[in-house]
Amino acid sequence: MTDDVAQKLIDLEIRLAEQEVTIDSLSETVYRQWQTIDKLTKQHDRLSDRFTAIEEDLEGAGSEDGPPPHY
């Protein structure tokens, strides 16, 4: 192998190693983001359920009591 070809091979190996590090870093970032998304989705679902329950309680309470006493 000539020195030029050997140097090109070394440069490619270095670039490959750097790309592997970048890919690993990006994969870790995506993993952490999905964990956050899952957590926020669960929290949103719980809050939505609570909000719906409160709305139902308020609607149910208003129909049972009739008009306010000042009528």
Image (tube, rainbow, N blue to C red):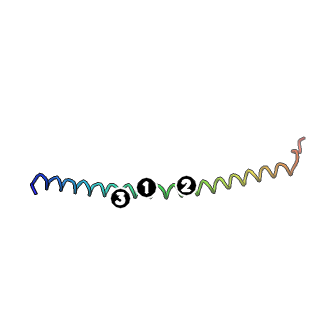
Ranked by sequence position, the earlier of labels 3 and 2 is: 3
Q: Is residue 6 left or right of residue 70?
A: left
- Secondary element type, mark 1: helix
Q: Quadrant of the N terminus?
A: bottom left
| Residue type at tag 3 | Asp
How far from the left and from the top, in percent, is residue 41?
57, 55
- Label drawn at residue 30: 1
- Neighbour class for label 2 at 10 Å: few (<14), some, many (≥20)? few
Instruction: Please state which of the two labelled residues, at mark 2 or mark 1, is closer to the viewer.
Output: 1
Labels 2 and 1 touching (C-beta < 8 A): no
- Label drawn at residue 49: none
Q: Determine which quarter of the picture holds residue 23.
A: bottom left
Q: Determine which quarter of the picture holds residue 18.
A: bottom left
How far from the left and from the top, in percent, is residue 54?
72, 53
- Neighbour class for label 3 at 10 Å: few (<14), some, many (≥20)? few
Q: Which residue is mark 2?
A: 40
Labels 3 and 1 touching (C-beta < 8 A): no
How far from the left and from the top, in percent, is residue 19?
29, 54
Instruction: Please state which of the two labelled residues, at mark 3 or mark 2, is closer to the viewer.
Output: 3
Q: Which residue is mark 3?
A: 24
Ranked by sequence position, the earlier of labels 2 and 1 is: 1
- Alpha carbon separation for disc pair 3 and 2: 24 Å
Q: Is residue 6 left or right of residue 54?
A: left
- Alpha carbon separation for disc pair 3 and 1: 10 Å
Q: Is residue 43 left or right of residue 52?
A: left
| Residue type at tag 1 | Val
Q: Is residue 26 above or below residue 70?
A: below
- Alpha carbon separation for disc pair 2 and 1: 15 Å
Q: Quadrant of the C terminus?
A: top right
Residue furthest top as drawn: 71
